[in-house]
Amino acid sequence: MPESYHVDAYKVEGKIDYDQFAKQYGLKPIDPELTKRLEKYTGPLHFLLRRNIVFAHRELDWILNEYEKGNPFYLYTGRGTSKGMHLGHLMPFMLAKWLQDKFGVEIYIQIPDEEKYLAKKDIDMSLDEIHSMAMDNVLDIIALGFKPAKTKIFFDTNYANTMYKNAVRVAKHITFSTVKDAFGFTNESNIGLLFYTAMQAVPAFLKSVEVGHNVPCLIPLAIDQDVHFRVARDVLGKLGYYKPSIIYTKFLPGLDGTSKMSSSEGGNTIYLDDPPEVVKKKVFRALTGQQATAELQKKYGGDPDKCMVCQYYRYFFEPNDKKLEAIFKAERNGTLLAGEHKAALADTINKFLKEHRRKKERAREKLDKFIVSD
Ligand code: TRP
């Protein structure tokens, strides 16, 4: 990986070069041939796909081949817990929900509550505390509208009988040297985290174990999770299961223009529980790349690619391509000034969050329909 950025499961830093990442790890671009095939089943594509925010895949073409042969897939994704989820965390789940609706397929959602317990040296939280934080994350996920009859959500510690039995089968095929190379573990790393990747592999073949024959699996994720599945794909092949297919979303950038909205850099990150005033304050500090004065802006215009307000519409808040282009145009020709531009985005975000919180409250009553344990 070039010096300028770093992406792995436990650290994301610098300015991410997605094309370089794809090339280095052998991901394929989502090309027009593939989107045309997808569209045959889904109708108009989700804007994340249309805008190349879902930018790469592994063997999505194979998933469609199998689908066409009458061998449908299931979806799998997951969520390592954090105190509060932010907007960026929702993106792979929004994609997953869309895929669930369009293909009418099941989804398994893993909540590895032990992972953050093991990974975070700096937070001194008990497993129980992490567990209740995770429960709040689950409500945010359910709020996106997953279908209860086709969605299984499980916490590793509460589904241990099923998970552990299968994880040891994976772990037997992963050497210390493999995880050391893949994750950058050292002699100081704890052994729980060394084992953890085997737990994350399990839901990628769990359905096959349950039904007694191989079922294709498609995993929507952000690129920091790829490393787990580079390891897992090798092992699952050895165990006689299908290798899971993957589609990759880019990270929602931070409001300051950094590559990734980060949980630890609160000022550039919109959390799902940020009150309206806080959202406004943060959005008003966003990087717009506009000229120094309104006069100059009117004269020279701005650059939508550098303006984070424009980018937030592109990544999240304006699904309509024509409306998005109108916003970009107004930015380019200088008719849209930073103040009103930011005020409008803050408003849009606050409306979204208000609605999200309403759905989250309702999700509480439905929890039992989603969560499985053993
Ligand atoms: N490790 C992921 C995280 O830290 C959580 C996760 C578990 C996951 N299984 C997954 C993410 C499958 C994507 C796909 O957030």
Image: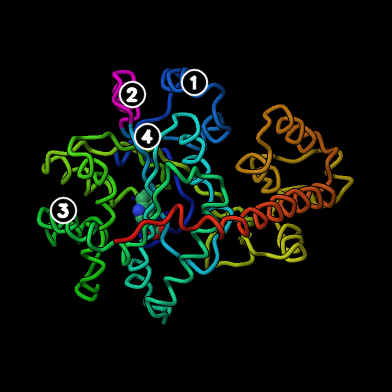
Between marks 4 and 1 in the image, the one whose residue lies nearer the viewer: 1
Image: magenta residue range: 59-72
What's the magenta bit mostly, secondary-structure-wise? helix
- The Cα–Cα distance between marks 3 and 1, rounded to whole angstroms, is 35 Å
Earlier residue among tags 4 and 1: 1
- How far apart are the alpha carbons under marks 2 and 1? 13 Å
Above or below 162: residue 186: below
Q: Write the residue at 47% across / 46% down.
A: 148
Crowd rating for badge 1 (residues with CA inside 10 Å; few <14, some 14–19, many 20+): few
Eye-nearest disc, 2 or 3: 2
Q: Is residue 224 visible?
A: no
Kind of residue indicated by mark 4: His
The earlier-in-sequence mark between 4 and 2 is 4
The image's mark for residue 39 is 1
**Residue under numbered circle 4:** 57
Q: Mark 4 and mark 2: span between their CA atoms?
A: 16 Å
From the top left corner, tell me how far across and down residue 118 is, in percent.
32, 72
Which is more N-terminal, label 3 or label 4? 4
Q: Quick one: 129 or 45, which is closer to the camera?
A: 129
From this view, report whether residue 323 is shown above or below residue 166: above
Front tag of 2 and 1: 2
Residue 246, by quadrant, is top left
Q: Are marks 4 and 3 in contact (CB under 8 Å)?
A: no
Give neighbour class at mark 4: few <14, some 14-19, many 20+ (Cα, 10 Å): many
Q: Amino acid at mark 1?
A: Glu
Viewer can see residue 110: yes
Q: Residue at x 30, y 41 (%)?
A: 25
Residue farthest to the right?
Answer: 295
Direction from residue 268 to residue 119 in the image, left or right? left
Q: Which mark is residue 170?
A: 3
Picture disc at residue 67:
2
